[in-house]
Image (cartoon, rainbow, N blue to C red):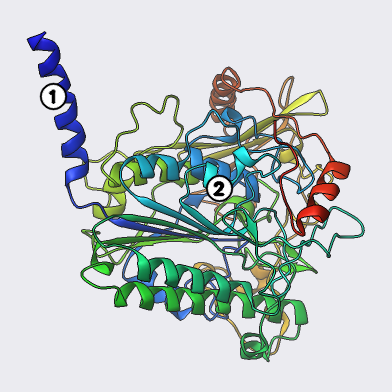
Amino acid sequence: MGMRLFAVFITLTEIVVLTSAIQPNIVFILADDLGYYDVGYHGKSVLTPTINNLTADGVRLEQYYTQPICTATRASLMTGRYPIHLGFQKIGSINIKSALGLPLNFTLLPERLRELGYTTHGIGKWHLGYYNPKYLPTNRGFDSFFGYYGADLHYFTHTSYDLWTQPPPNWCLDLHNNSKCVPNYNGTYSLDLYIQEAERIIQQHSSNTPMFMYLAMQNIHNPIEVPKEFEHLYYDVRSIDRRKTLGMVTALDYSIAKLVNILKQKDGNFWDNTVLVFASDNGGWPIPDGQGSNYPLRGSKLTYFEGGIRVPAFIHSPLIKNPGRIESSLFHVSDWYPTLVSLAGGSVTKDVNLDGVNQWDVISEGMGENMYPPRSEILHNLQLYDGRYVNGAIRLGKWKLLTGAWANCTIESYPPYCFWTPPPEFNTAISYSFDTCESMGTSDYQFSKETNPSSYIDSRYGPVTLFDLEQDPYERYDVQESYPNVVELLIERLDSYLQSVVDDVQSPWEADKWEKAAKAAGCLAPWDFD
């Protein structure tokens, strides 16, 4: 009996030690569809003074990777797992009429932080399911939620903007305070609403309790809508869509400036004990109704080229021991789960089969001479395509392999988004420069749009394409013929991941039930209460 009591005492002591240290406040800002070029420290034509300053005094994550579309990235962020281990390898974006949500058997990041004593607040875009109340944010770990459930939303009316439904259900409100509709904000720009809610929470928050705030901003996802004062800052950009998109970026930056001021004005040492994370959920979408830019990276949102998955990200905090630097080690969105849980004083030992790794030491201190990077490999995704080939995308060190339809831009939704698309302002009379392209002649700005189809055909994976990202970060040259052993190694790695792939989650379309529930509630609302 004495030994049992001693064991219990030791266990309780470990818990106290984990949580007795001063736990930092965590503010996570997730931008939507913000492309690689669309921050001022990459694109000189982009006005983001706040982001630039926070990055300069923090740590810029220059090899930061996400999934190529909304829901998949958010699912990895909240669970610390790749989509293949969530059943989301084919579900990139949950439609508002789908009876689908992030599986309930996973403990989400806000749930883990709440277990550690944090108050948890979600603001902005959810997009992880709502058809059943069990999937709502306040039932997945958030103490409060103010925002929207779906993917697309008008910025001023806060009504649904669904690209995939014709005609779009523009009548349907999608703005919620916890689980209640919020109908009285028509005409107020969404960023202003989110910052107002953030200010209310921060002002009422007790500094004796650590806070986790997740701000999933709407900008710069389509539709392209922005207050005129931000659009006018880019009067010299001839493309109207691009001018508005750049205005949306600067509006986002301005909102972040207001948020930082609110945090700094909080009593005590609140700001000094705050970790602020900023990242985009996927690459930009350089199409007429979404003029984001990933230049000079290849590809866009929806693709597994660098432009679709390598995005702006940084972390800023007085708690960082070695700030003011660029970190070039690999980082995947799934790494935030173990990194932030560990930073909060918790342990992820009970979270079995995590794909994310704890990156805090690298973030805070940098890579020492004798340190090995926490991550050398990223599985971007795996999925069976048309019953024949396995589409695969994997990064190992400097090597990146694409297989199947992803290798040759043959997926229906890819062209022309798997090539290199300079931002429209490059065609103006104004001369713009770009940091990471200074070594490239101006003639290199216009890349060829020939795909160079792969000559290597694997019986299971189909055509493959291999890139050396150290020598060729813009993915211009397929080098698989020169490095067949590397191709073989990476296919073996894909084979190993295939052993752990879970079944795809199903996404039944329930339009009639959706419409009935939405009209009854006056906004998007759950319709399944089983």
Return the residue nearer the eye: 342 or 189.
Answer: 189
Q: Position of residue 202 (x, y in %)?
A: 38, 67
The label number, if any, that marks residue 137 in the structure image: 2
Specify the farthest residue to the right. 167
Return the residue nearer the eye: 210 or 166.
Answer: 210
The label number, if any, that marks residue 10 in the structure image: 1
Q: Name the image quarter holding the N terminus.
A: top left
At 77% from the left and 61% from the top, the residue drawn is: 160
Above or below residue 111? Residue 257 is: below
Above or below residue 495? Residue 437 is: below
Residue 477 visible in the shown view: no
At 67% from the left and 67% from the top, the residue drawn is: 292
The first of marks 2 and 1 along the sequence is 1
The label number, if any, that marks residue 378 in the structure image: none
Left or right: where does residue 99 sit relative to residue 139? right
Inspect the image, locate mark 1, and give the three-letter code of the amino acid beneath it.
Ile
